[in-house]
Amino acid sequence: MRHKHELYPEEQKTIKEELLRMLELDDHHSILLSDLDNNTNKQEQIMNLLPRIRTFFSMSRITAFAYPESAKRPWLSIIRHLLKDDYDMVSADWRVENEDGSSLRTKRYFFHKR
C-alpha cells in the first residue's frame, strides 16, 4: 500500500500554498496569534480545508483533524501539522500596544523555510 505523500504530492503542495496565502504572513514571515484568534473568517477558511486535507494527507491520529470540535484552536493545529515539513515554526512572546495605551500579550509565530 502506498502512502498519501507518494500518491498526492501535487495536491498536498497546492493545499499548503493555499494555507500560506490564507495566513497573509508579514514581511518577517510571521503572524500574531491574537490576529488569528480575532479573525473568524480566516479560521473558517482554514477549517474549510479539512475535507481536502483528509483526502490528501494521512492525519487520522491527530485530534484536530479527527475531532476538531474537541481542540481549543483546531485551525492552529492544522497550520502546524501541514507546514511542519517545510517550515520551522518558532513562537515568541509578543506585546502589542493598543491605541488606548494598554498592551496585549500574545504569541508571534515565525515561519522559517527549511
Image (spheres, rainbow, N blue to C red):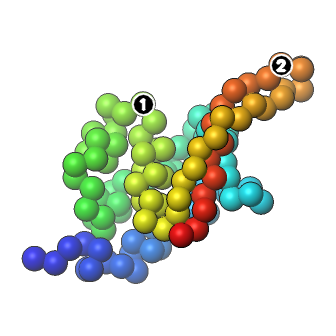
**What residue did someone put label 1 on?**
72
Closer to the eye: label 2 or 1: 2
Residue type highlighted by circle 1:
Lys
Identify the secondary structure beneath mark 2: loop
The percent position of residue 111, horizontal first and vertical second, equals 60, 58
Q: Mark number for residue 102?
A: 2
Instruction: Estimate the spatial distance between the alpha carbons at disc 2 and disc 1, rounded to whole Å.
Output: 26 Å
For residue 7, above or below residue 78: below
Residue type highlighted by circle 2:
Ser
54 left or right, relative to 17? left
Q: Nearer the viewer, residue 86 or 62?
A: 86
The percent position of residue 93, horizontal first and vertical second, equals 66, 35
The percent position of residue 84, horizontal first and vertical second, equals 44, 59
Does label 2 or label 1 sit earlier along the sequence?
Answer: 1
25 left or right, relative to 52? right
At 34% from the left edge and 43% from the top edge, which residue is drawn? 64
Question: Are discs 2 and 1 less than 8 Å apart at CB?
Answer: no
Q: Mark number for residue 84?
A: none
The percent position of residue 114, horizontal first and vertical second, equals 53, 70
Which quadrant holds the N terminus?
Answer: bottom left
> Residue 17, can we see it?
no
At 53% from the left edge and 43% from the top edge, which residue is drawn? 43
At 32% from the left edge and 31% from the top edge, which residue is drawn? 70
For residue 26, above or below residue 32: below
User: Dot 1, how many residues are within 10 Å of its Cα: few (below 14), some (14-19), or many (20+)?
Assistant: few
User: Dot 2, how many residues are within 10 Å of its Cα: few (below 14), some (14-19), or many (20+)?
Assistant: few
For residue 21, above or below residue 6: above
